[in-house]
Image (tube, rainbow, N blue to C red):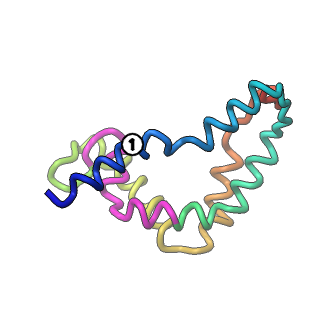
Amino acid sequence: NRRSPFLRVLSTLGKWSLADVLVVCILIAVLHLDWKVNPYEIRSGLENELPTILQYVKGKYPDVNKNCEQLLGYPCEIGKALVIHYPQCIACKTLVSNAYTHPDWTTSEGKDIMEGIELGGGGNAQ
């Protein structure tokens, strides 16, 4: 099989796919690095990068029906969805479709959703 050598190499290197995360964790633990984390700055950064994030999500998950089924946890396809789930399915499909098709969504509804997320935490990562 032509793929066997490639799969062996991939299985060996796959174990190191999170090596950079491991190195940072070790540095924080060994050097006792204190990292000041401001949740409001993180949310602000996410709001600024929302168009880029949304573009990535759209490319990775283009099917609105499947997205809503995964988000809601029940089928939203016509004929498969229960009548009681129709309003939630329609709302989900509308939200995802608007996010995917209207570039200004990230500065209006998307920003409102981000501001509705409750933040917490002490602000330190040790």
Indicate whether residue 102 is drawn in magenta. no
Closer to us: 56 or 69: 56
Image coordinates of residue 93 in percent, x first then y, are: 39, 58
Q: Percent position (x, y) of residue 26?
A: 69, 30
Q: Quadrant of the N terminus?
A: bottom left
Task: Name the side, left or right, on which 78 lies relative to 10.
Answer: left
- Residue at the spot 26% in from the left edge and 53% down from the top edge: 5
Q: Residue at x 73, y 62 (%)?
A: 48
Callout 1 secondary element: helix
Closer to the camera, 117 or 89? 117
78 versus 38 height, above or below:
below
Give the residue number, with chain letter if any, for mark 1.
12
Residue 38 drawn above or below residue 55: above
Q: Quadrant of residue 122?
A: top right
Looking at the image, the residue that sits furthest to the front is 5
Q: Nearer the viewer, residue 17 or 72?
A: 17
Residue beneath the point at 70% across and 38% down: 24
Chain part drawn in magenta:
56-75
Residue 85 coordinates in the image, percent (x, y): 30, 43
Q: Residues within 10 Å of mark 1 (few under 14, many from 20)?
A: few
Q: Residue at x 69, y 54 (%)?
A: 46
The quadrant where residue 83 appears: top left
- Which image quarter is the C terminus in? top right
Q: Amino acid at mark 1?
A: Thr
The chief SS type of the magenta part is helix
Q: Nearer the viewer, residue 34 or 120?
A: 34
